[in-house]
Image (cartoon, helix red, strand yellow):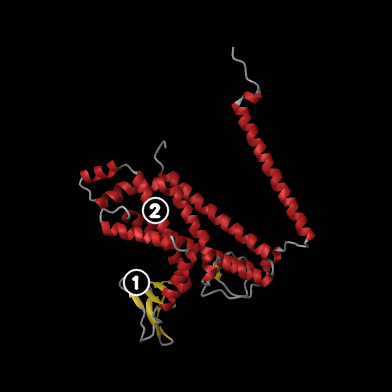
């Protein structure tokens, strides 16, 4: 008859005890840190004052910004008479806008460049390699400065001597006042400007394109690694069925690649979202820029940046949650 071993030799019991020990240590560490922080606040006469967010903001935000009316819970245009909380919400909406557009654009470009890295065409493969290496080895802030100061601010002003640039059959209009998708050209103050459609200020356009292009270089390498992880026989089988290289890549290889690359892809999406805080360098009013203005005017830095930290945490957890759902949706049955 088998006898039960003593608890110090029972692997299951020891595992449970180890987990309990870790939880207790972490709880004690958090308690100690909280106590120390509270004593430090008292010693330096620091008191948290969350009423700062109900005070009028009193400052403009660049171009037209949207916020959430905290009284009616409806989206409205931001006004300087709105509260500091509504100003930070406007910055948060801008950050979300940058993240959504940037992630979509970076993924699209990254997949194309990643596939081009493995192209049988020597020139295409080398051009893709140069794209990746040039972008990955230069600082992101320098790239944002380049897009803003050297590209968008140097575009035509829309006057008769410097007419707007019209791309894709007139779908996209470029001037030094920003980028417009759709809309119609109208004359204002002696200049031709796009009216209607989706408008991006020079700051927003430079930020979105800069972040997307920079992140696409890293996504391209992730996609390249994912393609190499798929068995070479998959493409050979596709070619034997009469599919072209492009069709085999699109219909056979890439659907398998996306199952592999979602975790590292998620890291790049999170990086893009957090890197949007570099908009402070080109004057775009995203979350950090707005909170910095609130902090400098109210002298309540701790409260302002606590809210910013929590907002970025929620954004990151949301992106991670969505990607986990996609990963589960794409997972093979029984995998």
Question: In the visual, does 246 lie left or right of 223?
Answer: left
Mark 1 lies on residue: 171
Vertically, is 172 above or below 131?
Answer: below
Q: Is residue 208 above or below residue 16?
A: below
Q: Residues within 10 Å of mark 1 (few under 14, many from 20)?
A: few
Quarter of the image containing the N terminus? top right
Where does label 2 land, which residue? 221
The residue lying toward the viewer, choosing from 144 and 334, is 144
Q: Circle 2 — which element? A: helix
Residue 301 at what x, y percent from top left?
A: 67, 65
Residue at the top extreme of this rendering: 1
Quadrant location, the C terminus: top left
- Residue 244: x, y in percent? 23, 51
The answer to whether 245 appears left or right of 323 in the picture is left
For residue 243, the mark is: none
Q: Helix, strand or loop at disc 1? A: loop
């Amino acid at each position: 008859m088998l006898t039960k071993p003593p608890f110090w030799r029972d692997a299951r019991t020891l595992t449970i005890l180890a987990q309990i020990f870790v939880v207790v240590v972490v709880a004690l560490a958090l308690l100690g840190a909280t106590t120390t922080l509270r004593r430090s606040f008292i010693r330096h006469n620091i008191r948290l004052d969350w009423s700062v967010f109900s005070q009028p903001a009193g400052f403009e935000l660049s171009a037209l910004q949207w916020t959430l009316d905290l009284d009616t819970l409806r989206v409205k245009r931001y006004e300087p008479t709105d509260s500091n909380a509504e100003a930070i919400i406007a910055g948060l909406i801008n950050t979300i806008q940058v993240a959504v557009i940037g992630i979509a654009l970076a993924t699209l470009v990254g997949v194309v460049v990643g596939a081009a890295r493995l192209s049988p065409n020597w020139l295409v493969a080398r051009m893709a390699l140069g794209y990746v290496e040039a972008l990955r080895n230069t600082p992101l802030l320098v790239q944002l400065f380049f897009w803003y100061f050297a590209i968008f601010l140097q575009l035509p002003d829309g006057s008769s001597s410097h007419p707007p640039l019209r791309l894709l059959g007139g779908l996209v209009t470029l001037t030094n006042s920003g980028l417009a998708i759709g809309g119609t050209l109208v004359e204002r103050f002696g200049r031709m400007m796009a009216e209607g459609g989706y408008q991006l200020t020079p700051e927003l356009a430079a930020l979105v394109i800069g972040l997307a292009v920079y992140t696409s270089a890293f996504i391209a390498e992730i996609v390249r690694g994912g393609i190499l992880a798929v068995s070479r026989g998959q493409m050979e089988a596709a070619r034997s069925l009469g599919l072209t290289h492009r069709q085999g890549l699109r219909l056979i290889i890439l659907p398998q690649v996306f199952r592999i690359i979602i975790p590292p892809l998620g890291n790049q999406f999170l990086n893009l979202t957090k890197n949007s805080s570099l908009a402070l360098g080109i004057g775009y009013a995203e979350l950090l820029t707005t909170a910095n203005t609130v902090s400098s005017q109210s002298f309540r830095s701790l409260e302002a940046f606590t809210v910013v930290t929590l907002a970025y945490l929620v954004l990151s957890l949301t992106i991670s949650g969505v990607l986990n759902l996609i990963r589960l949706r794409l997972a093979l049955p029984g995998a």
